[in-house]
Image (cartoon, rainbow, N blue to C red):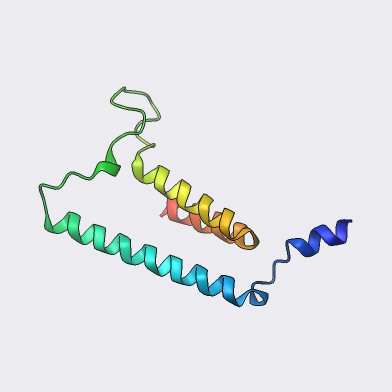
Amino acid sequence: MITQHCKMYDLEPWKYPKQILVLVVLLLFTAFGIMVYGTYRCRVPEFEDPFTRSIAGEEQHHLNQFIDGWGWIHFWFFAMLSFLFPTFWKNFFAAGLIWVII
């Protein structure tokens, strides 16, 4: 039973070339979307970024300075990747931590 469980979560990524291809395409598409959105924000100064607003509203809660739309987007993005590609969840967790630290 334990060996079956370990085989189900095999962590050898080279065994999943189609999964890796889909993942790379998804990450490239996401990076392209971020660049397009960032370019638009820079070129249109009157554009107000909706993701910089606090999720909790205008209340002055001590966590409001840390929780905004971008934080939630990053959380759900890495959660979605981990759900779609459970083999690589540790990689996504590490990437998410590095993203937040930087």
Q: Nearer the viewer, residue 17 or 72?
A: 17
Position of the N terminus by quadrant: bottom right
Number of marks present in the image shown: 0
Image check: 52 left or right of 102? left
Quadrant in the picture for residue 6: bottom right
Residue 82 x, y percent position in the rendering: 57, 55
Residue drawn at the location 79% of the way across and 65% of the way down:
7
Determine the residue positioned at 60% across, 77% down: 17
Residue 102 at what x, y percent from top left?
40, 55
Q: Residue 77's x, y, as percent?
A: 46, 52
Between 27 and 90, the one lying in front of the other is 27
Residue at x-position 87% and y-position 56%: 2
- Closest to the observer: 102 or 52? 52
Q: Using the image, determine if residue 53 lies above or below residue 37.
A: above
Judge whether 85 appears above or below 22 on screen. Answer: above
Q: Is residue 99 left or right of residue 33?
A: right
**Residue 92, percent across and down?**
54, 58
63 left or right of 19?
A: left
